[in-house]
Image (spheres, rainbow, N blue to C red):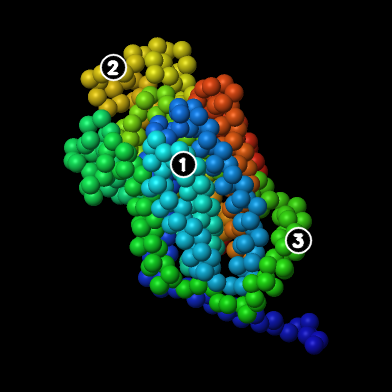
């Protein structure tokens, strides 16, 4: 058709985008609430320190074994995430994938109950259950994240992601409080944090309260993920079969990887995310183990530390989402990385009788109470700083990915996002484990994280982000 030069061109009609009602968004937010106890109870504050203190032969070996298991799970996730994300884009719905990997989270977590101290199979059961649950939790999260752009407008993605992380931290906090107050007891006194005998007849000497964190995580997920399945709308089916999608997904993934050089900001962000997320995962994975080995903290001390850290994490994630919408996710993530660098340096400077590497401090003595020494108090403060900025870093990374990804390929790119967060996740924990083994020092193991944060921050600084109108 030929259009006269003096004709007035009418703007093309743009179909309005319809977003689901508030109930659907609220139900989606509860996925983070449902999944977070795995990361709070098992990965960080209860089961991981229990593994290092009661199952492994010594804390250093426990940290090394946990690192190798974390690294193996991360390698599996790195290899499969973008491929599965591309398949989900081509078939449509995300919920079936969440159900399959959620089942892995439930089964792996539940198996941790059978890691009985003194049993010859305790260590293999603990590590296998942890690996299976980690793969399930991470893949379920990947497909849940891919639903974000269908729930709210682009200018609200920071709020959505930050609120989800805050609700998740709150769920982790409540689950941790339940374990410490009612279930996990000091093996010497037989009493919980609030002085009670463990509920359900759990035996403190056999560390049944610590082991019950696995079944509790599984039950918590099943109950609280249900609203998302019931009320949050899923993507429509495309009509493409799974086999056909898998065949095409491999080629599409290769095309996407070849396309990344033409998307410099997206590729640079994925590379940066790969590096700084690896450091954050390792920092959380070994935080409780580090405290158990350096300061001799038991479940009660680590649990209180976890509660305080989770409170700051909830506040940080909630505030970070609002700051994200105001100034952008990139600025939030860079600020968080700077704080994490300070925290890592501070932690490395601590010893039971020393702060800032050379300043002597009186070590804890019997009767000093919880966190009685100055190095312990400093470690506590640095942990609270980590909690305050970790939520904004993760939430703003997620919203930044949602803003950068092409809408029609969001699952595929969130698969790459998961890949970028996991492709070297086997490397970070493994390097921590190797350094711990070689130098027989937990401090040496954590020193590798500083380089990761520095490199990730430098790469992210060069990312150009186009803000939503």
Disc 1 designates what residue? 121
x, y (%) of residue 276? 57, 41
Q: Quadrant of residue 142?
A: bottom right
**On-image quarter of the C terminus:** bottom right
**Viewer-nearest of labels 2 and 3?**
2
What distance separates the C-alpha of mark 2 from that of mark 3?
61 Å
Say if residue 284 shows up in the picture. Answer: no
Residue 359 location, quadrant: top left
- Tag count: 3
Instruction: Please report the residue visible at 18 percent of the width from the left and 41 percent of the height from the top.
Output: 196
Give the farthest residue toward the bottom: 1
For the residues bearing labels 3 and 1, Cβ distance under 8 angstroms: no
The label number, if any, that marks residue 255 in the structure image:
3
User: Which residue in the protein does label 2 denote?
Assistant: 365
Image quadrant where one finds the N terminus: bottom right
- Taking depth in this image into account, of 209 and 376 the one nearest to the observer is 209
Q: Is residue 434 left or right of residue 54?
A: right
Residue drawn where x is 43% and y is 70% of the image: 229
Give the CA separation, mark 2 to mark 1.
36 Å
| Residue 131 visible from this viewpoint | yes
Return the x and y of residue 4 as percentages of the image width and height: 79, 85
């Amino acid at each position: 058709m030929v259009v006269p030069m003096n004709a007035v061109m009418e703007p093309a009609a743009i179909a309005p985008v319809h977003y689901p009602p508030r109930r659907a968004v609220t139900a989606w937010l509860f996925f983070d609430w449902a999944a977070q106890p795995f990361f709070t109870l098992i990965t960080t504050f209860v089961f991981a320190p229990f593994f290092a203190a009661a199952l492994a032969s010594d804390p250093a070996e426990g940290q090394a074994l946990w690192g190798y298991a974390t690294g193996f799970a991360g390698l599996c996730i790195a290899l499969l995430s973008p491929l599965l994300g591309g398949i989900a884009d081509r078939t449509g719905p995300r919920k079936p994938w969440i159900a399959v990997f959620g089942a892995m989270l439930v089964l792996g977590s539940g198996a941790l109950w059978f890691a009985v101290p003194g049993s010859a199979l305790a260590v293999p059961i603990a590590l296998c259950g942890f690996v299976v649950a980690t793969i399930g939790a991470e893949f379920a999260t990947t497909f849940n994240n891919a639903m974000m752009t269908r729930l709210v407008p682009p200018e609200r993605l920071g709020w959505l992601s930050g609120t989800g992380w805050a609700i998740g931290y709150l769920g982790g906090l409540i689950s941790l409080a339940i374990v410490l107050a009612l279930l996990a007891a000091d093996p010497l006194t037989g009493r919980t944090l609030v002085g009670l005998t463990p509920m359900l007849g759990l035996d403190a000497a056999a560390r049944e309260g610590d082991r019950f964190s696995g079944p509790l995580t599984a039950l918590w997920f099943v109950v609280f993920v249900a609203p998302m399945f019931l009320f949050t709308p899923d993507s429509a089916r495309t009509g493409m079969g799974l086999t056909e999608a898998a065949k095409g997904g491999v080629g599409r993934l290769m095309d996407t990887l070849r396309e990344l050089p033409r998307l410099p900001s997206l590729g640079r962000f994925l590379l940066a995310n790969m590096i700084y997320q690896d450091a954050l995962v390792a920092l959380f994975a070994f935080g409780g183990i580090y405290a158990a080995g350096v300061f001799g903290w038991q479940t009660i001390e680590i649990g209180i530390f976890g509660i305080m850290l989770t409170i700051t994490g909830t506040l940080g994630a909630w505030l970070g989402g609002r700051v994200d919408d105001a100034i952008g996710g990139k600025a939030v993530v860079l600020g968080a990385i700077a704080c994490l660098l300070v925290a890592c340096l501070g932690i490395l400077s601590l010893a039971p009788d020393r702060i800032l590497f050379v300043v002597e401090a009186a070590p804890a003595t019997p009767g000093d109470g919880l966190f009685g020494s100055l190095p312990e108090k400093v470690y506590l403060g640095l942990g609270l700083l980590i909690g305050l900025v970790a939520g904004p870093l993760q939430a703003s990374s997620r919203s930044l990915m949602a803003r950068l990804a092409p809408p029609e390929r969001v699952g595929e790119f969130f698969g790459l996002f998961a890949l970028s967060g996991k492709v070297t996740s086997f490397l970070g924990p493994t390097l921590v484990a190797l350094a711990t083994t070689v130098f027989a020092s937990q401090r040496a193991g954590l020193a590798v994280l500083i380089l990761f944060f520095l490199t990730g921050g430098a790469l992210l600084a060069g990312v150009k982000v186009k803000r939503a109108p």
